[in-house]
Amino acid sequence: MNDTERTAVFFLAGLGIGVGVALLFAPRSGEETREWIADTAEREFKSLRRSGRRSMRQLQATVTKGQDILRDGTEALASVAAKLG
């Protein structure tokens, strides 16, 4: 499991534990608590989605960099092969 997956798992586990504790010790009414949970879940979901987008951009940049390195290596190998052959 990579760091992003591990972070997502810990985030979701923490969110679940936090919701459970909040329900047990909530000083608010049921309706207020449900609204708070919905707002918190929405905010955390948006945060997780931003993290996912950031991870995708980093992955795309890494793949592009790898493609560039591979292309440069292929060109260098073709150049050496042409000189030898």
Image (tube, rainbow, N blue to C red):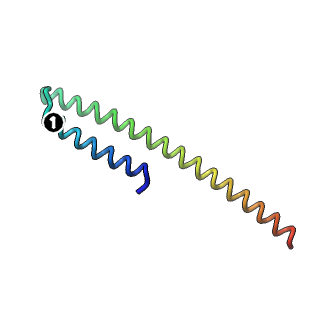
Q: Residue at x 34, y 32 (%)?
A: 43
Q: Residue at x 81, y 69 (%)?
A: 81
Which residue corresponds to mark 1?
23
Relative placement, left or right, of 80 versus 44 is: right
Question: Residue 41 location in percent, x, y?
Answer: 29, 36
Q: Residue furthest bottom?
A: 85
Q: Quadrant of the N terminus?
A: bottom left
Question: Residue 63 location in percent, x, y?
Answer: 59, 52
- Local packing at callout 1 (Cα closer than 10 Å; few below 14, some 14-19, many 20+) is some
In the image, residue 12 sits, relative to residue 31, either above or below, namely below
In the image, residue 12 sits, relative to residue 22, either above or below, namely below
In the image, residue 84 sits, relative to residue 3, either above or below, namely below
Relative placement, left or right, of 29 versus 85 is: left
Q: Residue at x 50, y 46 (%)?
A: 56
Question: Residue 25 location in percent, x, y?
Answer: 13, 33
SS class, disc 1: helix
Query: Looking at this view, is 55 or 30 the one in front?
Result: 55
Relative placement, left or right, of 20 versus 12 is: left
The quadrant in which residue 69 appears is: bottom right
How many numbered discs? 1
In the image, residue 74 sits, relative to residue 61, either above or below, namely below
Q: Quadrant of the C terminus?
A: bottom right
The amino acid marked with disc number 1 is: Leu
The quadrant in which residue 73 appears is: bottom right
Q: Residue at x 18, y 40 (%)?
A: 20
Question: Residue 5 location in percent, x, y?
Answer: 40, 51
Relative placement, left or right, of 62 versus 10 is: right
